[in-house]
Amino acid sequence: MPPSPAIGGASEVPTQVFERFLEALSATDIPAEVVARLRKTLVEDKTFTDRALKAAVLSEEPLP
Amino acid sequence: MIRIDSITIKEFRGIRDLTLDFEGKSFAICGPNGTGKSGIVDAIEFALTGIVSRLSGEGSGDLSLKGHGPHVDSRNAPDKAQVSVKVTIPSLGKTVTVERSVKVPSPPRVTPSDPAVLAVLGQVESHPEIVLSRRELIRYVLATPGKRAEEVQALLHLDQVEQVRTGLKKIANACEKQLSGLNGPVTEARANLLRALGITELTKDKVLAAANAQRAILGLPGLTELGDATSLKDGLATPGPAHPRHSSKSQALADIRAAREALAEIVGVTTTACVAEVEADVRALASDPTVATGVAQDDFYAAGMGLIANDACPFCDTPWDLDDLRAHVQTKIEHLEGISRKREAAEAKIAPLVVLLRKNQSALDLLVRYGPLAKPPLTLRVVRDYIEQCAANAATLEALLPLADTIAALAAMSTIPEAVLEEVAKVEGAVSGFPEPTRQDSARDSLAVAQERLEVYRSAMRQQKTAREQAQRARQVSDIYAATSDKVLAGIYTDVQRDFASLYSFVNRDDEDKFKAQLVPSMGKLGFDVDFYGRGFFPPGAYHSEGHQDSMGLCLYLALMRHLYGAGFTLAVLDDVLMSVDAGHRREVCALLKKEFPGTQFIMTTHDPIWLQHLKTEGLVSGRAAIKFRRWSIDLGPARWDERDVWAEIEDRLKQDDVRSAAGFLRHYLEYVATELCHRLRAVVEFRGDAQYQLGELLPAAIRQMRKLYSLAKDSANSWGHQELVADLSVRESNFVSLAAVSKAEQWQVNVAVHFNSWENLGAKDFTPVAKAFRDLLGGFSCSHCGEFFRATPERETFDSMRCDCGKTNMNLLKKK
């Protein structure tokens, strides 16, 4: 009964999800700076508040 | 992750002072209920995480770490309650000591400490699931889908994943709502611009034609292009004091007309009918008492469904029928879903009314600008108040709740105060009295107003464009996140499900080798159905026995942990997790743990000595990597069976001339050790269905078996022509026979007079040689190098060898063929 090859557990599940999400996002027309901001928020700062996410997605510029 | 080398516990829970050497290996702690096993588990959890879940988790009531962590006699001195663990961190190749006291549980004192060490310990601290009790284990299996999802999510730290999913969705929804709110201003700006230009279609050609007609009157060159920066009044001198700016009379009258039309529309037949319909819908919603608190109730019912587990209400103990109650609560949840649909329908009908109110507000905003131009100027206070009322009503309608306010707003919007119409008439009268401007003045004013409104329109369009881009981006990001996380989680659940089924099949391969399971995530819930002998998939509690459910819980836990940590799954503390599993399947669990998790240190507690035996015979724990608690006292804490301590304690008691106590102690120890010897040597004992074997049955059987094994070993050596070995075995056998004879152990069955019952009547001087005789006899069963008792192998079928754990003793029992 060999362990499933998919069972790696090299990183925490949230990190796996965030990395795959950012990878998928990079393949779209979403601006690179948005992807970079989301990477900083999710992977580096590990901040998941609505405010931090909004700043990352919509940038810090004032809303119209 | 880490491995635990040793633990020292002082004044913690039921333990006064205890040190255990795990040596980084799997370890078993066995003892009857109440002998302090779980205290060790609590201590490990506390040392690694700073918490004791049984004192802080669900159902812990008034218990607390500070209040109940220390030994009861040190309850007012939490500083004395201390736990220290020495752990090895394989990934760093370091060994560190982690110390905590109940007085200051966090941060721990780590020696030596560096950022890499603290990072690893921090990771361990954030994963208290390394300690698992049966109570926690069964949560994975028998919980409701919603609760199970929470448990699994907590284990996998999916709360962060869900938090981000919710956050991104919220942002996307907010952006779309904001975009929707900008449609009204664009429509209004467009209408105002059309009116200013006197056209009905907003095309470049028509705008340019209308503007150029006015420009021609002023002798200005015609515009050929209408770009983002084009000014319709390009070249027109800024009006100075000689040519004060005054509004175009015709424009003003057109704006007032538009305001009247807006007012008329809001009280028109169509709108009134629409308002009446919406009001009826909202009143219907309001008549349902559950609507106002619908959202809160939805959460309440969902939580309640998870708590319907026992046969009676937890508040008043009134018995209830579980199925009836579940059906009743489910009806309420479905009722709320119906309300939610009605609410969405009402909101859809309200949206055009909000647009009308905003239109009214915008038209009147233009109108009030003409008030100051009247002579004397008009303040138009009533109209201004009405504008504010329109804005407030629009906001109320958009919010929908509270419903009473919405009903009031609907009622208010159908009526226009007479004073408003009177002030509108006053403005109209004043504007009508304005002198007719010259053709040039009129053209100049028209261009100025048109340009002003073009800029408003451009600004509104820019805002809408930006908002649209943001809404599209936010939605795209949210959708991609949802799709990606679903895919990752589905992959995880597929892997875990496959691994779980594989582990469970291994344990139950005697009758469920084709076992399958389904982990189905859906809407924040995690369904868990298992195959029942090929008859379909059912919840684990439906048909499987409690024992099967226990092993399912363990297998699911192991599958999740393996997924979570992979090769980093180096430690698990299992507190009596398989109490409902029968002996045969526990043995399979041992084999499973050894085979599938060779890199994991399991620290296990059990009240069942047979389970301990299985752990040893399957090689999951070595002979010395286990302790057996024999009793617990409030003053001393747990007391264990330790060979070195046993003889020292007997000696101490004899020094105190307490033969009765020493004799009882020796008897208990021999009962324990004779069971172990019979098991290891595969001794033949008359079978007893109640498994209540007497010492007089066990020890003689072990001695007979030992002699038989020596005999087999000699026969084997002879067959191979190893005469020196034959001689050596003969000496060993002879020595053993002498030791047995001195102990008189074999006579017990035939001579009750020398049975242990008579020992307590001996004096200390007489009993000392008895104790020595048994100590020597047990030495005859042991390896002189490692001190471990010999073992006949294999466990079943024909013997092939007698050996010890260290391998220094290995007697071949098979003859040459």
Image: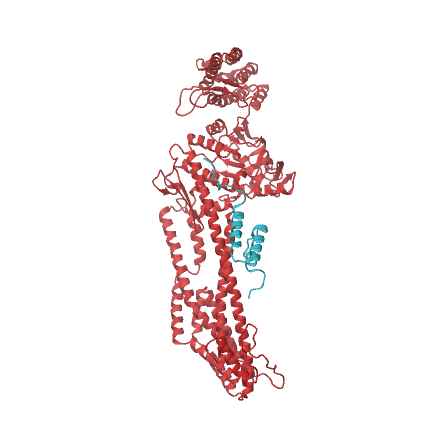
Please determine whether, in this image, residue B143 is positioned above or below residue B744.
below
- Estimate the x, y position of residue B245 in percent, counting from the top left: 58, 83
Closer to us: B404 or B247: B247
Residue B148, picture quadrant: top left
- Estimate the x, y position of residue B805 in percent, counting from the top left: 53, 23
Please determine whether, in this image, residue B618 is positioned above or below residue B349.
above
- Estimate the x, y position of residue B661 in percent, counting from the top left: 53, 22
Closer to us: B689 or A49: A49
Closer to us: B709 or B654: B709
Please determine whether, in this image, residue B411 is positioned above or below residue B314.
below
Colour approach in the figure: by chain
- Estimate the x, y position of residue B595 in percent, counting from the top left: 48, 32
Q: Which quarter shows the C terminus of chain B?
A: top left
Chain identifier matching the cyan colour in the rendered picture: A
Total count of labels: 0
- Inspect this view and state whether residue B722 appears: yes
**Which residue is at a point 41% across and 67% down the rendered structure image?**
B349
- Inspect this view and state whether residue B386 appears: no
What hue represents chain B? red
Q: In the displayed image of the protein, which residue is found farthest to the front?
A: B224
Q: In the displayed image of the protein, which residue is found farthest to the left?
A: B535
Q: Which quarter shows the N terminus of chain B?
A: top right
Closer to us: B811 or B679: B811
